[in-house]
Image (spheres, rainbow, N blue to C red):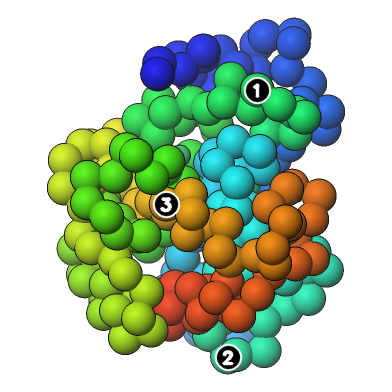
Amino acid sequence: MSDKYPSMRALYADPLNVEGTTYGKRWKRHEWIQLVEAQATDNPKTEKVVLAIHGGGIEGGTSEVALAVAGLHPATFAQATDGRGFHDLWIFEGLLSSGNSDLHVTSTEYDDPIALEIVQNARRCISLHGFCDDTATANKKCQIGGLDKELKSILLDELTALEIPALIAVGTKLGGSDPFNICNRTKSGAGVQLELEKTFRESLFAPNCFTRELRKNNTNADFDKLVLGLRTALSRVN
Ligand SMILES: [Zn+2]
């Protein structure tokens, strides 16, 4: 299925799309703090970003996972206490009651200026997506793509250790190998794209809670396990 809009700029230019009503943006960029004498401003700990560019009702569950991986509770924004840090965040979400796929702009044409600015200033990126089960190239819940080979392999280790079925994806779409894919537009020209199967995303929330209104307050232990794997992987790279 091809996208309704060729770019985010085209989406924003259509008067049908109203920020806060039909779509939303949420983002966070690290607060620069330089109180220590001679502290380096490019502290690598602050240069990681988590994306859900098809969040809200577009690819359900990715907004909630992105917030949690960045270190914030998806409903209360309470800060994580696991010592694995806080990450920059970009979420674009569909807020429509139906038809949110109209708000899907492909990763390689993702020209939102705030999102690009955040990613281009990051050293590491995990871009979360959801796919429908029948488009899977293999029967795995998590497909790890992108050009950041180091982070991909660490992420595969962490997910496998937690018994979350995952594989390294191949090809340009699930594989995220296009250099123009927003996940790869970091300082190093590489990032990770993590595609989560629909039934797997549904399994991260309490039964009958897979709606935008309910998900944020109804995450379960499997959600926490996935978030732990992602946060641990990010903590293992500079
Ligand atoms: Zn997507």
Discs 1/2, front: 1
Q: Is 52 drawn above or below residue 10 in the view shown?
A: below
The residue at 48%/73% (across/down) is 226
How many numbered tags mark residues here?
A: 3
Discs 3/2, front: 3
The residue at 44%/73% (across/down) is 230
Q: Secondary structure at mark 1?
A: loop
Whichever of labels 3 and 2 marks the residue nearer the N terminus, that label is 2
Q: Quadrant of ligand 1?
A: top left
Q: Secondary structure at mark 3?
A: strand
Classify mark 3 as within 8 Å of ligand 1 or not, answering yes or no.
no
Q: Where does residue 50 sit, x and y in percent of width and height?
A: 51, 58
- Say what amino acid the circle numbered 3 marks: Glu
Q: CA distance from mark 3 to mark 1?
A: 19 Å
Mark 1 in CB contact with mark 2 (< 8 angstroms): no
Q: Where does residue 88 sit, x and y in percent of width and height?
A: 57, 61
| Residue that extends furthest to the front in the rendered view of this protein | 207
Q: Which mark is residue 220?
A: none
- Say what amino acid the circle numbered 1 marks: Gly
Q: Is 209 drawn above or below residue 11 in the view shown?
A: below
- Residue beneath disc 1: 99
- Residue beneath disc 3: 197
